[in-house]
Image: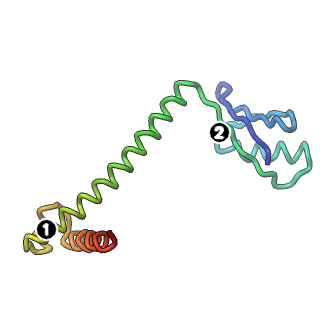
Amino acid sequence: MYEVEVELDGRFWLVRVPAIDRSTQARTFREVPEMAKDLITIMTGEEQPVIELRVTLPEEVEARMAHIEALRRREAAARTEAAAESRQVAWMLRQQALTLADVGAVMGVSHQRAQQLIAEAEEVDAIA
């Protein structure tokens, strides 16, 4: 496997392959893997080399990307929690002898979705 170092260089991407001590450029990030593989093939004769990209971006960009990833993790956790709460609420409403149509209407979902939520709640309860 060849490690490929990639960084912005003005309007281009600088593509370095330390193992062969050579560099090339790509106009777009999508071109980077192809340019790296072509460079390795030309310099070593190896067909279909396997590469691993190591992308270096400006520090401020890296920090913001890390923040985005943290936000996405929190969003996923919130969605998981909301789904569990939705199942519980649907089940609780059904225990109050509401029809599926009423459960759905109260929760702002279709009666089919209300039925799914109740079934999922019962499934989770049966497992627990």
Q: Which residue is mark 1?
A: 103
Q: Which residue is mark 2?
A: 28
Front label number (2 vs 1):
1
- Residue 63 point in image, percent of width and height: 51, 29
Task: Compute the Cα span from label 2 to label 1.
Answer: 51 Å
**How was this image coloured?**
rainbow
Q: Residue at x 68, y 26 (%)?
A: 9
Q: Nearer the viewer, residue 74 or 32?
A: 74
Q: Image quadrant of residue 101?
A: bottom left
Q: Secondary structure at mark 2?
A: loop
Residue type at the position of mark 1: Val
- Residue 18 point in image, percent of width and height: 82, 35
Q: Secondary structure at mark 1?
A: helix
Residue type at the position of mark 2: Thr
Dot placed on the residue nearer the N-terminal end, 2 or 1: 2
In this view, which residue lies farthest toward the front?
128
> How many numbered badges does the structure rendering display?
2
Q: Nearer the viewer, residue 42 or 66?
A: 66
Q: Is residue 74 above or below residue 13?
A: below
Q: Image quadrant of residue 39?
A: top right
- Residue 77 point in image, percent of width and height: 37, 49
Q: Quadrant of the C terminus?
A: bottom left
Q: Is residue 101 above or below residue 2?
A: below
Q: Nearer the viewer, residue 116 or 48?
A: 116
Q: Residue at x 77, y 34 (%)?
A: 16
Q: Residue at x 30, y 53 (%)?
A: 81
Q: Residues within 10 Å of mark 2 (few under 14, many from 20)?
A: few
61 sits to left or right of 82: right
91 sits to left or right of 40: left
